[in-house]
Image (tube, rainbow, N blue to C red):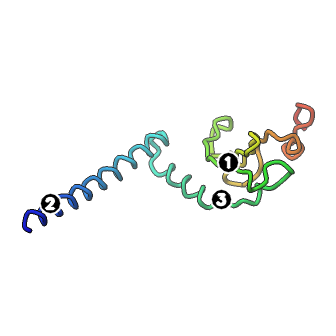
Amino acid sequence: MKSSVLVLIGIVAILIVGGAFAFTFMDKIADVADGGDSGTFHKVANKVDKITSSDRSSGSSGSGSDIVSEIVKFNYQNGEGYYREVTYKDGGFRQFDNATGEMIGSSYDEDQEKLGVINGSLE
């Protein structure tokens, strides 16, 4: 009886220590993945949770039920900020500015007018 209680206490202790280590380790990975800017990764993750689906169903392609993934990425082309890239079952994608929700990129022809692109040149 005494040994089974000690074994149980040992298992609980291992789980607590392992959980604390895993939490700390994952937090460090998040900071490294974010380029060392502590907290930004978590802010972006929170924004992803709050994203609305109002822009998903524009056009005939890529309706809300056809979404394969949504990923928030750093906007390297702009040098700052983040955008949300929505990928659809048909292989197409749309990109939305994370701060404004405005469409900033798309692989669909019907979206090009919304982006200000006509026949490959800017409007």
The image shows residue 113 at horizontal and vertical percentages of 90, 44
Report the side of 26 relative to 90 (left or right): left
Residue depth check, mark 2 versus mark 1: number of the one nearer the observer: 2
Question: At x 86% / y 41%, what residue is drawn?
Answer: 112
Question: At x 74% / y 42%, what residue is drawn?
Answer: 93
Circle 2 crowding by C-alpha within 10 Å: few under 14, some 14–19, many from 20:
few
Amino acid type, callout 1: Val
* Residue 122 position (above or below residue 97): above
Question: At x 38% / y 45%, what residue is drawn?
Answer: 28
Q: Which residue is mark 1?
A: 68
* Real-space CA distance between mark 2 and mark 1, rounded to the nearest whole angstrom: 46 Å
**Of residues 24 and 5, the one drawn nearer to the viewer in this rendering:** 5
The image shows residue 43 at horizontal and vertical percentages of 53, 55
Mark linked to residue 7: 2
Q: Which residue is mark 3?
A: 51
**Of residues 62 and 37, the one drawn nearer to the viewer in this rendering:** 62
Report the side of 64 relative to 50 (left or right): right
Residue depth check, mark 3 versus mark 2: number of the one nearer the observer: 2
* Residue 44 position (above or below residue 9): above
The total number of labels drawn is: 3
Question: In which quadrant of the rendered image does the C terminus lie?
Answer: top right
Mark linked to residue 9: none
* Label 2 secondary element: helix
